[in-house]
Image (spheres, rainbow, N blue to C red):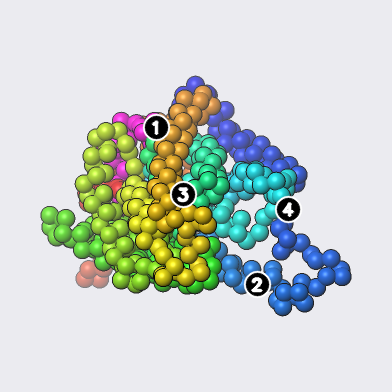
Amino acid sequence: MGVIPEKIEKWILPIFLFVFEVIMLILYGALVQYDSLGTPAPVNTSLMESHGQDPALAAVEKTYPLFQDIHVMIFIGFGFLMTFLRRYGYSSVSFNFLVAAFVIQWATIVRGLFSFVDVESCCKIRIGLESMVNGDFVAAAVLITMGALLGRVSHFQLIVVALFEVIFYAVNEALNGLVFQSTDIGGSLIIHTFGAYFGLAASTVLFKKKARDHDRNSSVYHADLFSMIGTVFLWLFWPSFNAVLADGDAKYRTLINTYYSMTGSVISSFLLSILFSEKKKIDMVHVQNATLAGGVAVGAVANFMLQPWGAMFVGFSGGIISVVGYRFLSPLMEKIFILDTCGVHNLHGMPGVFSGVVSVIAVAVASPANYGQTLGNFVIEGRTPGQQAGYQVATLICTLVIAIVGGLLTGLIARFLPVLQSTPDDELYDDEPYWELADDADKYLPLTSGEAAESDVIIKTEGKTESIKLQYSGEPQKAA
């Protein structure tokens, strides 16, 4: 399996994770502290008297319920959404678990170091509920990238990609926060667009010809059902994802706008899936993914005065973009050596760019007549709406550039660094190299479209009991 003996190779990931965790414990001990809400007040100071309510409790009541929803999205929604591959279910949901936990720890340090630009916050990283939310946001971007690479890279390569992506993510986030100061309440630009194009760029460098038409790059009936668990969880909790960092009436609007936008993408996904089918039937790939595009499409403008009809239109458009991408664009991308296992370009990339374009228009037409004293939440003081719209464009362009350049560089590291092992062609999209599988695993995980999954079924006919074999030999569904 490459330049490193197999016996040594098996130790690389556990050694790396051990060293990483030791370094994290040292850095957390030296730099990381609770924020002011997590620190007990001095004996002679009563926060309850000065604020009327314990601010820590108020923060928990305001933020933690939405954070819980986002946490479910990260660890169940994203994880199960990627279980559609016929022999990669263990890896999909469990590597999602590992990568997300890794990113949360690493992102706290990296984002905290960037906060030292503010002299007042130097030189301690102060964490609270908002930093926990942002940790999950960074994890979301990295998991989107993982979706583009799913089944084609080793678990150690996934960790290394995450290691470097967090750094590039923090650079882009800092530029937006300190320079552009654009509006992107749901992270359609800095999370979804960034994660998708970072993954596509890395995927281009990590391209393997055998992976393009591999038999195991396909689904089976039960795998698609598991994937739908992820879809439903993501769909249900997406309003929380978009609204968690909003305040006041903007939070209220964000919840409503996301809610209706999500319904719009469901309608357009089913509509176009049937329309584009030769047999006029529904494609499960579209239902698993394009139905979620409304959450991405509305993300950058969910706190604006869209009105429910506008939110539905944005979501409906996002679903159209996603289905068109799956139906027509993905096959073209494969021909030019851009593999995208989960179709993140169609669910996160293009709808994210669309959301950025919509945000440019929404900011340009914003006025005191619509937003009153809250206009400053959308147009930075000293800027006109037109100027702010220009900064929205700059954020979109900057995000694409950093994501693509960062993805290409990270892909080169993951491909050519000697310690990183490339997945052999015969182990692509397969759990077996990484997991201790049950003895009967092959009954449920057919190796290729030609190999049948067998199960014993007992039947009784005229008082006689017989055991027969039922075989699944249907044609596999092409993965997104």
Check the image and report above or below for 224 versus 259: above
Tell me which amino acid carries mark 2.
Answer: Ala
Q: Residues within 10 Å of mark 3 (few under 14, many from 20)?
A: many
Tell me which amino acid carries mark 1.
Answer: Leu
Query: Where residue 210 appears, x then y in whole percent?
Result: 31, 32
At mark 2, the secondary structure is: helix
Furthest residue to the top? 3
Q: What stretch is highlighted in magenta?
A: 203-222
Query: Where residue 152 appears, x then y in whole percent?
Result: 39, 37
Q: Which mark is residue 190?
A: 3
Q: Residue at x 26, y 49 (%)?
A: 325
Image marks 2 and 4: residues in contact by CB distance under 8 Å? no
Return the disc, 3 or 1, that comes first in the chain's sequence.
3
Mark 3 and mark 4: span between their CA atoms?
Answer: 26 Å
State the image quarter where residue 297 is shown: bottom left
Q: Nearer the viewer, residue 51 or 346?
A: 51
Return the disc, 1 or 4, that comes first in the chain's sequence.
4
Mark 1 = which residue? 206
Check the image and report above or below for 193 versus 243: above
Furthest residue to the left? 278
Q: Residue at x 57, y 28 (%)?
A: 8
At mark 1, the secondary structure is: loop
- In the image, is residue 372 part of the stretch drawn in magenta? no
Q: Which mark is residue 33?
A: 4
Q: Which residue is drawn at 27% across and 54% down?
A: 321
Asked whether the viewer can see residue 92, the reply is: no
Q: Which of 151 and 402 is in front in this view?
A: 402
Mark 3 and mark 2: span between their CA atoms?
Answer: 28 Å
